[in-house]
Every structure is written in C-alpha cells, then in structure tokens.
Amino acid sequence: MSSFPSLPESEQEDAKYQNICNNHKHLLETLPKANGWRNPHLYNYNGFWLNPLVLKTNLLLHTYFKSHPTDIFLASFMKSGTTWLKALMFSTLNRHRYTFSDHYLHKHGPQSTFPLLDAESYPITDFTTFSHPRLFATHSAHTLLPPCISSGKFVYVCRDPKDVLISKWMFMSKLRPKDLPLLSLDEAFELFCLGVSEFGPFWEHVMSYWRASLESPEKILFLKYEEVKKQPEVVVRKLAAFMGKPLTVEEEKKGVVREIVKLCSFESLRNLEVNKKGVEKFGKLLEVEKQDFFRKGEIGDWKNYLSEEMNERIDGIMDDKFRGSGLSLRATV
Ligand code: PAP
C-alpha cells in the first residue's frame, strides 16, 4: 500500500521528498559528529563519516536511483586513482568511437565521463537518457549504496593508505574555507587513524568492497593503484574483459592497449589544456580547480611527509583491520 494513498502523484512525490529532508534534518541533530577535513563537521551514518550534503544525497539516492543491469560503477575512497580509472575505463570501453589523436578526453577531460553519484541532485538528475552501459562513480562504501545497484558491475580501485592520506590532506586543505582554522598534517593523521575523514574509515571502506569482490568476483573487479602503475597494460586488458569488451587479436596487433595507456598516463592527462585551466563542478558538493586532480601521481610520496613512527602506526592499524582477509596494502617499494 502507498504511504500517501489519497494524494495525487505530484503531491505524493513532494511529500516523499519532504520526508527525506525531514529525516536528513533529524539525522544531523542525532548522529555522532566529528571534525571534517573540508567542512566543519562529518556525521557518522551507518558506520561511515559523511559530510551533511553527501548524507542527504545518499538518502535521495536510495529513493530515486533506478539501476540497470548493464550499469558500470567505478568506486574508490577519495584520492585512490579515480581520475585515472575514469580515463582508462572510458577510453577502453569507447575505443571504437574515438581516434587516439582526436579523443573525447582531449576536449573534455576525464571527470565528465562518470557522474559522481554522491554529488548529483536527485530527483532532478535524469540518467534515463544516458546511453548504455551507463558509467557512474562513487566514493561511498559498498554497504552505503542502495541494494538495486548490485545488479551492475563495479571496478574498485584502492591505494596505499599513506599516499591516500597525503593526497587527501593536500587536496582538502586547498578546498577548506578560509574562515576555518588550517588542518595540520598531525591533526589529519590523527583523524585518519581514527577513521574520521570524508567517506571513511578508510579501512572499512576498502573492506566493504574487498568482501563484496570475494563474494561476487564476476561483479566486482578489485584493483590497486600500485598495480595499475606497475602493469597498466595488464590492467587495461582486465578492464576490457571485465566490461564485456575483451581486446581482439587485431587490436592487440595494432597496439590499442599501448595507445590507451599512453592517452591516460599522468603526464598526458596533466598536460592537456582542458585539465590545466578552469574548475570542475560536482553538483552542489564542490568545485575543484581541474589541475588539482593531477598532483604528483607517484607511489610512496608519503615518505616525504610521514615519520617512521607514523608509518608504523598506519601499518599496525592496517594489519589489525585486514587480518585474515587476504588483503594487504603494505608498501612494497
Ligand atoms: P578524487 O578522489 O578527487 O577523484 P583521485 O583521482 O582518486 O581523486 O586521486 C587523485 C590522485 O591520483 C592524485 O595523487 P597524488 O596527490 O598522490 O599525486 C593524482 O595526482 C593521481 N592521478 C591523477 N591522474 C593520474 C594518472 N593518470 N596516473 C597516475 N596518477 C594519477
């Protein structure tokens, strides 16, 4: 039975939306609260720290998002290689549509290829007009997503948490409003270790996808930034097969994999005019200088910032959190 049986459809919709807004307001008054890296506060919702707008978007996503079995999701904790994977997945999937000398990515950059589910304006956003397979990105933990989404396929990319911490601290410090006190690296480190950062705890985020990938390996491809860095061509082949478009012998002979890797390399993307100037808008959530998506793109930059004690503390937390899971994100270089 409908919750609003006597109201016309448009009013039912309004009432449904209003209900979510009221629930959101109530949650902000009652959920555990902690310091944010960009916003003043984060709220712990079902085990994860979200900023107020992302929390509202998550509630709306559960109500309004209609999945399709061919949907492909790119999931990641912030600063784990999302931009790179957007480029790799988009150019692998659409390799028949564009030439490598005059590519969509040259003119538009990688961000527009995957709308960020955590930043869209539901119910206004209309994904029904998108061509299939539809591509979406999310920074939300697997357990925070609406169950209908599991009909699609997921690529999850994770990264050494120490590099994530440094990358995120630098990124968020730039976005932090000037009227808030600076967040020092020591403070960010402490919050990160406690699990308090947007979409965190990092450990639980990673484990949510790791467990899901073990349960449904055909539905979730679990990747590490470091493995993409070391063997990008192997990863492109994996992505192509996973997305249902394996590389043909002819494509291999023509060097298509090498072209994709070259197009999406850090140097190539960073030097594109479209990625050097202007801002990228993610709904009402945030505006980012495009160049800020390309900082160093290296493995192990954390060594320039974290002490040996900090290094050992993160390793200790990782060992505890991942024990018995078969997963390790310990640095090997
Ligand atoms: P997001 O969470 O804001 O989407 P995301 O793209 O996941 O960010 O991560 C950004 C990191 O990936 C940056 O790392 P750094 O701060 O340690 O340098 C960025 O430089 C890196 N990055 C972006 N594009 C590439 C690429 N093509 N190859 C390798 N690393 C990349």
Image: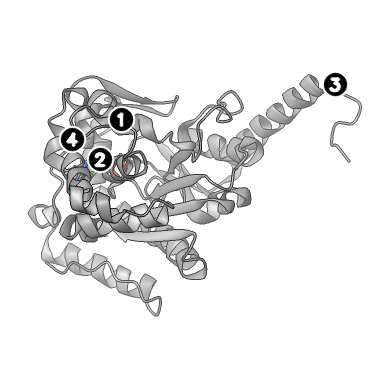
Could you say which is closer to the camera, residue 257 or residue 32?
A: 257
From the image, tell me which residue sits under label 1: 180
Q: Which amino acid type is marked by label 2?
A: Leu
Classed neighbour count for the residue bearing mark 4: other residues with Cα under 10 Å, few (<14), some (14–19), many (≥20): many
Are circles 3 and 2 on residues that touch, CB within 8 Å?
Answer: no
- The circle on residue 183 is 2
User: Where in the figure is residue 302, as x and y percent of width and height?
Assistant: 14, 55
State yes or no: Cβ of the residue under disc 4 lies below 8 Å from any atom of ligand 1.
yes
Colour option used = one colour
Per the image, label 1 sits on a secondary structure element best described as loop
Is 300 rendered above or below residue 118? Answer: below
Q: Which amino acid type is marked by label 1?
A: Leu
Q: State which tag comes first along the sequence, 1 or 4.
A: 1
Are circles 1 and 2 on residues that touch, CB within 8 Å?
Answer: yes
The residue depicted at 28 percent of the width and 44 percent of the height is 88
Task: Answer with left or right where residue 216 lies relative to residue 89.
Answer: right
Task: Answer with left or right where residue 213 lies relative to residue 251.
Answer: right
Marks 4 and 2, Cα distance to the nearest angstrom? 29 Å
Is 308 rendered above or below residue 98? Answer: below
Per the image, label 2 sits on a secondary structure element best described as loop
Marks 1 and 3, Cα distance to the nearest angstrom? 46 Å
- The circle on residue 269 is 4
